[in-house]
Amino acid sequence: MLTLIGIGLLLLAIIPTYILRRRRGVALLLAATISAALGFGIALTPMDRTFVLWGREFAVGGATTILGRSVLVGPMAQTALTFLFLIGAALFLLAWPLESGELYAPIGLGVLGLLAAALVVRPLVYAMLLLELAVALSVLLLRGGVGGARYLTFCILALPGPLVAHWLLDMYALTPDQTGLLYTASLLIGLSFALMLGLVPFHPWVPALARTESPLAVAFIYSAVGGTVWFLLMDYLLTYPWLDRSPYWSSALTILAVGTALIGGLLGTTRRGWGALLGYAVMVDTGMLVLALGRGEAAGLGLERAMMLTRTWGVLTMAAGLAALGVRQESAETGWSPWGAVAAAAGLLSLAGFPPTVGFVSRWGLYRLLFQEQPLMVLALLLASLGPVVGLLRMLPAALRAGVPARRAMTLTDLWLALASLSAVGLGIFPQLLIYR
Amino acid sequence: MGTFLEWVERISALAAPPAVGVLIVALGLVLVARRWLFQVLGMALMYFVVGVLHTQVIRPEVVLVKLLIGVVICLALGVTGQAAAGLVTRDDKGGDGNESKRETEGAAPPSWWRNLFRRLPRWSDDAPLRALALGAALLVAYAGSLRFPLPQVPPLVGLACYLLGVVGLFLAGMAEEPLGAGLGLLVFLSGFDLFFGALEPSLVVAGLLGLVQFLITLAVAYLALAQTG
């Protein structure tokens, strides 16, 4: 119940942030404060604690019914909400100096509210509808390039699968002898998540989005929307455990994961601009995440969460660096901001799992998990990870030719970028600060 | 209101076969014609026909709400199409706007039949390909509805669902600009909505699906205007 009140407050905050849109800094700081307060509040509040409101007793994390729909904050949703709100807070803070859009704060809050609602509402059919609402709203954060239309198309085409699967599962509950219903439902759910995660062959929207849109808007979609998709997928696997037990499911996940990582790595070696490089690095990382998920064990799920954290760190650092560079996304040319360049490189290396960045820590866990059984696959994944690094090396000369940095005092933006870059390395050396606790 | 609902139900019972025919014409307008006016007219016609077919699977009151959503979507698409077309024309003219005047100075005035010919709507270069795509969509939808009939819906409604789904996919796939992709998504979702309405009669689901369609229209309008402007 308390979580619902929090989400309601978040959505209400759209009004003041919209009114304050001309004073962008104030609106973004307000949005960041609310989001951070919710994130820390949800993380630190025991979910079994009760409170009294209007003479009635409610449990903080207990199930509540609203308009006949159940709202539940379990341990998974608690982690997901904390993750979502803290990402939101970080993005709002970064957007203050680095994003020029006036509506970043109100639209960002709206998207966060819808995503948070999707994470707690049950049955999952409503979660999918709320997720699609968030996807459509998040398009308003973009600049209007071709990538936005592709992102919208692929994500909306994913809507029918889970909705029809929900009906099929209802039918299966009535006629348990018809196992074909389960097969069709798992196919539909798998297809929908493949579309939303940008797995091969549904990957074109991932690099196109990063190539044509502003880096921090892209980071919002890759981290907040993408993170919610991952948590919903894990929720599906927990709600319908038979999905994970199917041999087809695991094989299909492995094929799609390796395919996505390899294609992302191969395309990452090309010189199509910094934005595209971010997209290809995310594709490689998505492949690794799906592979961890395909293990179908507790270790796989734990690793998956660790990889999501490190991926988000990499995406945010690189996007902030690109925003500071004032990248012209279509070309390899950039402006010049030394800390922007460092942040972009550090973020990309982390996404590629290059030691000693934080991205390497979770990758190392995956490689160790896989190496005993499939050493060749590990070799292929290592090669795929090298792709974006090669792309970075090919892009750097053009970036360095763009100009010599003017001598000036270190700004607050530079300080943030420096902190993000150093943290990407520092957390790689001391990973227990972020994961494996 | 009661009279109107009875009228809708009567039309629905009688009009299912012709409705599918009108739906093909509407989808033809959206897919083959590339002018925004024809496309919006096609969408309006499509929403009306889908509304008529909807009355066979859900309550007429809910259909009225869906029709209202369709009207709002068509209005938004119309305004977007007009604004985007205006921006394109302004960009095409460029300069001080007197170039065409200067070009025509000294040349003989065009004859009246040439003027008339110029004013007729012209087909785009890829119209034959798009017509072929419509034919292919018809074939796929017909074969699909025979081979894999959709559960819980009458055969003609099933055929319409397939038709909307396939044409929507074609439209979204062939689109070069956000408005085209958005039209494809809306057509696809209309087909899905027609089918899913029979499976899940919940009002909340119907409302959320309508809201998704409305937000898609808003997003597409924003993308189209941002790209053109």
Image: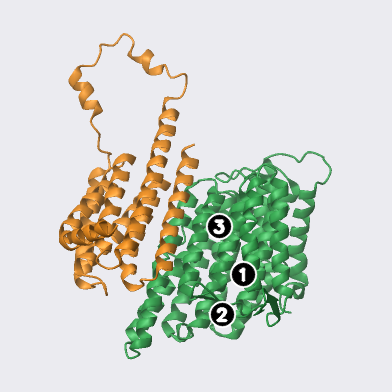
Q: Residues within 10 Å of mark 1 (few under 14, many from 20)?
A: some
Q: CA distance from mark 1 to mark 3?
A: 34 Å
Observer-nearest residue: A337 or B162?
Answer: B162
Secondary element at image label 3: helix
> Which chain is tinted orange?
B
Residue with the mark numbered 2: A375
Image check: A265 left or right of B55? right
Residue with the mark numbered 1: A4
Residue shown at 64% from the left, 68% from the top = A5
Could you say which quadrant of the image residue A369 lies in?
bottom right
Observer-nearest residue: A74 or A329?
Answer: A74
Residue shown at 71% from the left, 57% from the top = A32
Q: Is residue B118 visible?
A: yes
Q: CA distance from mark 2 to mark 3?
A: 27 Å
Residue with the mark numbered 3: A279
- In the displayed structure, B175 sits above or below A432; it is above
Q: Are marks 2 and 1 on the same chain?
A: yes
Check disc 2 and give the amino acid type. Pro
Q: Are marks 1 and 3 in contact (CB under 8 Å)?
A: no
- Assign the C terminus of chain A to one quadrant of the image: bottom right
- Assign the N terminus of chain A to one quadrant of the image: bottom right
User: Is label 2 or label 1 in front?
Assistant: 1
